[in-house]
Image: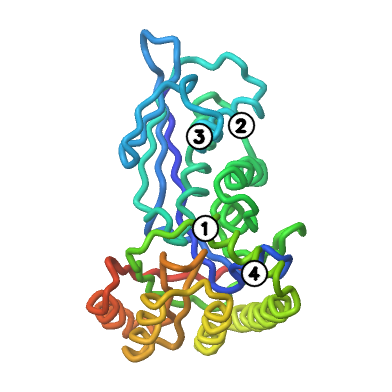
Amino acid sequence: MPAFSAYAPGKSILFGEHAAVYARPALAVPISQVRAHAIVRPRIGANQSLLSAPDLGLEEELDHLPEDSPLALAVRLTLSTAQITHPPAMHLRITSTIPRAAGLGSSAAVSIAIIRAVAGFLGISLSNAQVSALAYQVETLQHGTPSGVDNTVIAFEQPIYFIKGQPFELLRVAKPFTLVIADSGIQSSTAAVVGDVRRAWQQDPSRFESLFDAIRCITDQARAILESGETDRLGPLMDQNHALLQQMTVSCPELDHLASKARQAGALGAKLSGGGRGGNLIALARPEQAPSIAQALCESGAVRCFITRVEACS
C-alpha cells in the first residue's frame, strides 16, 4: 500500500462560544494558516501499527495505547467504521502547527487528519459528515460535553452556523474580511472551563440563561451582517460578545489586555475565541491595518500573531 497524507485546518469561533453548549447558535470559520498533518505508511516487516507524535513526545504501538488515548481512539473508530478488525501494519505520524489548548481547534483537527489519513491508506471513502461524527466522539473523550462546532467546521472546511442538536448550515459570506489572531501563550483546558461554566449555570441558571440569550442575539445579528457584506459592523458585536464572556468569567486579564490594545491599534472589534482563560484573541481589522495591529499585539504580550482572510462564499 502507498503512503497516504491528510491535512486539517484550525478553526476560529467568531461568535457564540460557551453559549453553543446550551443550544444557542455559534458562527465558526476554518483557519488554513495553521493545520494538522497525518501521514500513514506501511510498516514493512512488522505486524503491529505504530503511532508517532513528535510534538507530544509519543511513539508507541497502537495496541499498547490506553483506551483514553485520543490519538488511538481516532484510529480505532476509523477501523471500526470500516469494519476492519485486523488492519495491515502501518506507521501513523502526526504533526501540527496549531497551538494546543489555544482555542484554534487543535484536538479536532488532529483527529480529523488521523481519520482521513487512516481511511485513505486503507482505501476507504468517508463523507465529511462521517469524519465529523467520528471526530466528535474523540472530542467527547477529551472535552466532556463539546458543542460540536470544532469537528464540524474543520471537517467541512467552510464557515458554518451551528446549533447543537440541529443540522448545521453552511454560512454564506458575502464579502471577505480580515482577522488578526493573537495567541496569549496561556494554555487552557476547554474541558475545565466548560465544566466551570456548567457548575456556575447550575448554581444560577436564570443569570446564565440570560447571558446565553444575549450571545444568541449577537450571533444572529452577526450572521445577517456576514450575509449582507457589511463586515465592518461585526466589530461592535465582537466587543459586546467579549463583555458577556467576561461576565461568565471565561476571560482573563491577559486576554482583556490584548483586546484593549487591539482596539487602540485600530481594530474594529476584538474578543476571545474558544474556551477562554487563555488561548487566542481575534481582532477584526481592515486589511491595510492588520500588520500594525498584529505588531501592537505582539508588543503587548502575545507570543505569536498571524493574519488570516476569511473568503467570501455562497
Residue neighbourhood size for the residue with mark 1, other residues' Cα within 10 Å, grouped as few (<14), some (14–19), many (≥20): many
User: What's the amino acid at mark 3?
Assistant: Ser
Q: Quadrant of residue 17?
A: bottom right
Where residue 296 appears, as percent x and y from the top left, is: 26, 81
> Which residue in the protein does label 4 denote?
200
Upstream in the sequence, badge 4 or badge 1? 1
Spatial distance from mark 4 to mark 1, Cα to Cα? Answer: 15 Å
Compute the Cα span from label 4 to label 3: 29 Å
Residue 163 x %, y %: 71, 64
Mark 3 vs mark 2, foreground winner is 3
Residue at image point 46% right, 21% down: 64
Q: Which residue is mark 2?
A: 77
In the rendered image, the residue lying farthest to the front is 203
Q: Secondary structure at mark 3?
A: loop
Image quarter of residue 147: bottom right
Choose the circle earlier in sequence order: 2 or 4.
2
Is residue 1 among what the camera can see? no
Q: Position of residue 86 (x, y in %)?
A: 57, 14
- Look at label 1 and name its amino acid: Thr
**Which callout, 4 or 3, points to the residue nearer the camera?**
4
Callout 3 touching callout 2 (CB < 8 Å): no
Q: CA distance from mark 2 to mark 1?
A: 23 Å
Residue closest to the eye, 202 or 155: 202
The residue to which callout 3 is attached is: 69
Q: Position of residue 91 (x, y in %)?
A: 40, 24
Quadrant containing the C terminus in the rendered view: bottom right
Question: Which disc, if any, is residue 114?
Answer: none
Q: Are marks 1 and 3 in contact (CB under 8 Å)?
A: no
Q: Secondary structure at mark 1?
A: helix
Q: Which residue is mark 1?
A: 190
Residue at left 71%, top 75%?
204
